[in-house]
Amino acid sequence: MRAEVVRPEVRGLVRVAVRPRTVVALVALASGVAQAFGRFSYAILLPAIDRDLLGSYALAGLVGTANVAAYLLGTVVVSATARRADPTAMIRWGLCGSLVGLLVLWRAEGAVALAVGLSLTGVAGAFIWVPAPGLAGSVVRPSRRGAAIGWAGSGIGLGIVFASALAALLASRGGDATWRTVYLVESVLAGLALALCMVLLRPQGSPAAAEVVRSGALRRVPGWASLVGGYTAYGLAYSIYTSYLVSALEDDSGFSRGHAAGVYTLVGVALIFGGVLLGRLSDRWGRGRLLVVGYLVMGASILLALVGAEPFAAVSALAFGVTMSGLAAVIAAHLSDTLTPREFAGAFGRCTLAFGMAQVLGPPLGGWLAETTGSFVVPFLVGAAVAGVGAVLSLGVVRASRKPESRSVTSPGTGR
C-alpha cells in the first residue's frame, strides 16, 4: 500500500488525515484485541485456568460458550444499528468493552466472573470485527482492497502467537496462576489500542450525514446467497477442525501432547499471512475464483490431517490456517467491492450470523460423531465434505461476478 493520505471520499469516516497503512495497522491492532485476546486466549489458557480455578473441563466448556453466544448477540446488535452508527465509533466502543472484559478476566475468582468477562469480550469483539474489514478496505484503491483487508485480519494471528508465547514463558516461571498476568498484559495492550483509535480514528459529529445507507445492502452484492452459504460451510468446517485437531493427533495418531500442540500453533502462524496472501491474489484473479480454490484447499487440508504423520500434519495446519484467514478476507473484500463501510458492517454482520450458528453446531456434532464411531475420522471427513460444499456454492459468486451489471455497481460517494 502506498504511503498516501486518506482519500477524500472516506474523510467522512476518518476525521484525521492519516495514511492508509496507519488506518489498516490500527484496524489490525483492534482486530487482534477483539479475537486473539478476547476470544482465543481463553482456549490457550484453559488448561491453566482449569487447574488453578475451575477444576472441571465440563464447567470450563460451559463458561467458554458465553463468549460465542455473546459474540452472536453483538453481531445482531451491530447488524441492526449499522445504518445509523459510524464504523469507527463501533470499533472504539468495542475496544472499550474489550478492555473492561479483559480486566474482569484478570481479576476473576470463579466461573461466574469468567463468564461475565468472556461475555463482555464477545459482544465487544463483534463491535470491532464486523465493521473492521470494511473500514480497512475503504482507505485503499480497489486494486489493493483484498490485501488491505488481509493485513487487517493478520492482527488476529499475531495476537494468537503473542498470547501463546507469553503464556508459555510465564507458565515456565510461575506456574498455572500466571494466566492472570497474560490477561493483564492484554488489558494494557487493549488500552493502548483504544488510545490510538481515539486519537486517529475519531468519527464525525454527525454520522448520519456522512453517507447514504441504502436498505437491503447484502442483496445488492453479486452472488450474495452463494457467499453466505459458503461462509456457513466455512463456519462448520472450521469449528470441527480447530476443536478436534489436537485430540485427533493425540488419540488417533499417537502424537505427544507437546507435538500436537506445536502443530496447532502452526495454524496461528499461518493466520498471520493467510489473509494477506489470498486477499492479494483475489485482487488479481477475482474474489469468486479464490473462494472456490480456498474452500478446496481447506477441505484437502482437513483430509491431510487424517494421515496422522509428519510432515503431513504440519502441512495440514499451515494450509488450513492460510485458508481460515484468507477466505474470511476474500469474503470481506467481495462485500467491500460493492458496499460503503457502514453498509458493509450491516451486511457482514448478517453473514457472520450464519457463520456463527454453524460454528456453534460444529463442536457438538464433531464430538458426537467421534464418540459414536470411536475416532475422529468421520468428523474430519464431514468437515472436508462441508468445505467442498462451500467450493460448489462459491461457483455462484463466480457466475454472478461475470454479469455486466455486477461490474457496474458502485458505492455511493466513493466512485468505486
Image: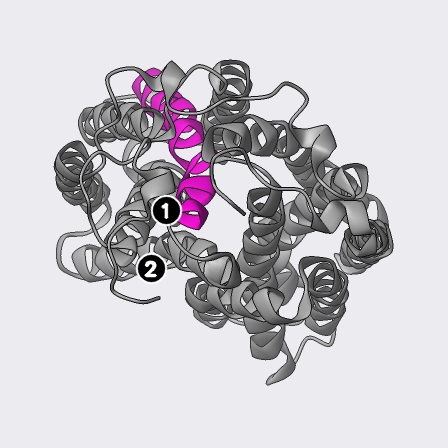
Res. 48 in view: no
Q: Which residue is mark 2?
A: 158
Give the SS element for disc 1.
helix
407 vs 247, nearest the viewer: 407
**Residue 150: horizontal and vertical position, in percent?**
46, 58
Residue 303 seen from this side: yes
Residue 244 percent location from the top left of the image: 62, 53
Q: Are marks 1 and 2 in contact (CB under 8 Å)?
A: yes
Q: Image quadrant for the N terminus?
A: bottom left
In the rendered structure, the answer to whether residue 156 lies left or right of residue 181 reads right
* Residue under pointer 1: 36
Q: Please say if 99 is above or below 222.
A: above
Looking at this view, is 184 or 179 the one in front? Answer: 184
Horizontal arrangement in the rendering, residue 181 relative to residue 137 (left or right): left
Could you say where residue 279 lies in the image, as x and y percent from the top left?
54, 63
Identified at 33% across, 61% down, the residue is 161
Identified by mark 1, the residue type is: Ala
193 to 73, vertically: above or below: below
* Residue at x 60% of width, y 41% of height: 410
Q: CA distance from mark 1 to mark 2?
A: 8 Å
Report the disc number at residue 77. Answer: none
